[in-house]
Amino acid sequence: MSVGLEAPRTKVVRKRGVNWEKWGWVYMRASGVLLVVLVFGHLFVNLYAGEGVSAIDFGFVAGKWASPFWQWYDLALLWLALIHGANGVRTLINDYSTGRIVQPLLKWALLGSTVILLILGTLVIFTFDPCPPVGPESADLLPSFCSTLP
């Protein structure tokens, strides 16, 4: 059995609508460039400009996230990296899974987990409170920079 190929320079008729594969490819390239810049900025600030990895603790993160700039910076890093990774896994699902049930199931599971992680990560970044109100019985659990006064 032979496989037929179209003759060279044959006009290919494309379906109407959005070409999602093309835009996925473009997103991977653009987000990859942005991620390189964001990741190296993140590493520079956290490891080189500070006191190194030994200084990264709860207080360091609390101090960084007290600034809206770092909240939005980390949010951009989270969203770009998570969607970039999910798009890569979607490509793997397209390439290596078969079946009319398995492939859509894997894609829906990927979409669901990505959306849940984006929502949870966003909530953590914007609702993080290093000094939550606690009762006197658990005041010793607060970080040292938090005031125990009500």
Image: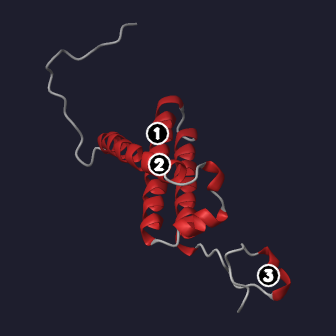
Residue highlighted by disc 2: 44
Please indicate whether residue 94 sits to the left or right of residue 145 in the image.
Answer: left
Whether label 3 touches label 1, CB < 8 Å: no
Residue 76, position in %: x, y?
42, 58
Residue 129 or residue 76, whichever sits in front: 129
Looking at the image, is mark 3 or mark 1 earlier in the sequence?
1
Q: Which quarter of the rendered picture does the N terminus lie within?
A: top left
Q: Do the numbered discs 2 and 1 sit on residues whose CB atoms are within 8 Å?
A: no
Which residue is identified by label 1? 88
Earlier residue among tags 2 and 1: 2
Residue at the extreme top of the image, as rendered = 1
Query: Residue sitting at 56 percent across and 69 percent down?
Result: 63
Q: What element carries label 2?
A: helix
Amino acid residing under circle 3: Ala
Find residue 94 and report its horizontal and vertical position in percent.
47, 35
Does residue 34 sit above or below 60 in this rendering?
Answer: above
The residue positioned 60% from the left and 63% from the top of the image is: 60
- Say few, some or many: other residues with alpha carbon within 10 Å of mark 1 (under 14 / 14 to 19 / 20 or more): some
Dot 3 lies on which element? helix
Which residue type carries mark 2?
Phe
| Secondary structure category for the residue under label 1 | helix
Q: Does residue 92 sit above or below 53 in this rendering?
A: above
What is the crowding at mark 3: few (fewer than 14 residues within 10 Å), some, or many (at least 20)?
some
Q: From mark 3 to mark 1, how far is it between C-alphas?
A: 45 Å
Q: Mark 3 points at which residue?
A: 139
Does the rendering let one see residue 90?
Answer: yes
Residue type highlighted by circle 1: Gly
Q: How many residues crowd mark 2 within 10 Å: few (<14), some (14–19), many (20+)? A: few
Residue appearing at x 59%, y 72% in the figure: 128
Rounded to the nearest angstrom, the CA distance separating label 2 from label 3 is: 34 Å
